[in-house]
């Protein structure tokens, strides 16, 4: 079957149903986090955070980080471990629109007192009068349509004191076919397999992210392709 990656797909993912719950979802969340960690996804986001923290004189001041579409909280726990190692004062907040997902993340993060979670609609969140030091968007941005991405990124720009770190999928045929192999290796359930393939087709090419940057008037940003078929998009806002 020929795969068309010339344009972003608008096909729906099963996980876009915010009322979804149960063991199938729990298994999907944990395996997605595991694969992301194994393929260097957490490291990629952490690199972006480190890059932005260079813009701030680090002392004992609290650094607030919001993780949009936090899933099972794996990225936040990695950040908490990093902060403890470097003796940094991180206040970490995860937001997701699915209450079951939030409850699962909370359960996995019981030993991390500096992590909190909130079930909320991100489009409502960006309307609030709140400011975070850094806003993260890891494997989340591809869930939205182009016009929604512009709205979200404008909101993130207004709410981030230091900047935004986006880590998301490169839309390519090679990534699509390699993922089918990963599904077998990691024993992904059918929902994870189907959603994963749709996610890749909803991912980005470099020109997409460059176009968003122009529309958003980002004068300074870093955009790099990274293994495994990811784009790292860092936007300083300071």
Image (cartoon, grey):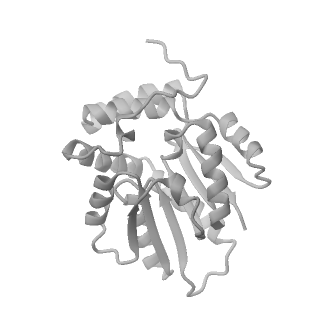
Instruction: Single out the residue that lies furthest toward the bottom.
Output: 60
Residue 223, how many percent across, how many down?
Answer: 67, 47
Nearer-the-camera pick, 76 or 84: 76
Nearer-the-camera pick, 165 or 83: 165
**Which residue corresponds to the image point at 54% horizontal and 81% vertical from the top-left?**
62
The quarter of the picture where residue 134 lies is bottom right
Instruction: Single out the residue that lies furthest toward the left.
Output: 23
**Which residue corresponds to the image point at 34% horizontal and 56% vertical from the top-left?**
72
The quarter of the picture where residue 179 lies is top left
Residue 88, how many percent across, how many down?
Answer: 51, 80
The quarter of the picture where residue 172 lies is top right
Q: Is residue 48 above or below residue 200?
A: below
Q: Quadrant of the C terminus?
A: bottom right
Q: Is residue 83 above or below residue 181?
A: below
Residue 188, how many percent across, how many down?
Answer: 27, 36
**Which residue corresponds to the image point at 63% horizontal and 51% vertical from the top-left?**
153
**Which residue corresponds to the image point at 38% horizontal and 49% vertical from the top-left?**
38
Residue 71, how many percent across, how many down?
Answer: 38, 53
Q: Quadrant of the N terminus?
A: top left
* Number of numbered tags placed on the structure image: 0
Left or right: residue 177 compared with residue 137: left
């Amino acid at each position: 079957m020929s795969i068309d990656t010339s344009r972003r797909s608008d096909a729906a993912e099963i996980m876009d149903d915010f009322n979804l719950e149960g063991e199938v979802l729990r298994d999907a969340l944990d395996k997605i986090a595991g694969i992301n960690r194994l393929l260097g996804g957490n490291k990629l986001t952490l690199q972006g955070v480190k890059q932005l923290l260079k813009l701030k004189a680090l002392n004992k001041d609290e650094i607030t980080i919001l993780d949009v579409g936090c899933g099972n909280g794996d990225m936040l726990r990695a950040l908490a471990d990093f902060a403890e190692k470097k003796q940094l004062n991180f206040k970490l907040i995860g937001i997701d629109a699915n209450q079951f997902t939030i409850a699962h993340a909370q359960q996995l993060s019981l030993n991390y007192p500096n992590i909190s979670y909130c079930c909320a609609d991100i489009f409502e969140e960006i309307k609030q009068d709140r400011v975070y030091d850094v806003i993260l968007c890891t494997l989340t941005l591809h869930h939205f349509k182009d016009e929604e991405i512009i709205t979200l990124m404008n909101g993130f720009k207004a709410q981030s004191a230091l900047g935004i770190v986006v880590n998301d999928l490169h839309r390519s045929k090679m990534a699509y076919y390699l993922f089918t192999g990963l599904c077998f290796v990691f024993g992904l359930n059918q929902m994870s397999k189907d959603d994963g393939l749709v996610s890749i087709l909803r991912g980005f090419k470099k020109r997409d992210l460059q176009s968003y940057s122009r529309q958003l008037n980002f004068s300074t940003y870093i955009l790099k392709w990274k293994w495994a078929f990811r784009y790292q998009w860092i936007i300083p806002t300071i």
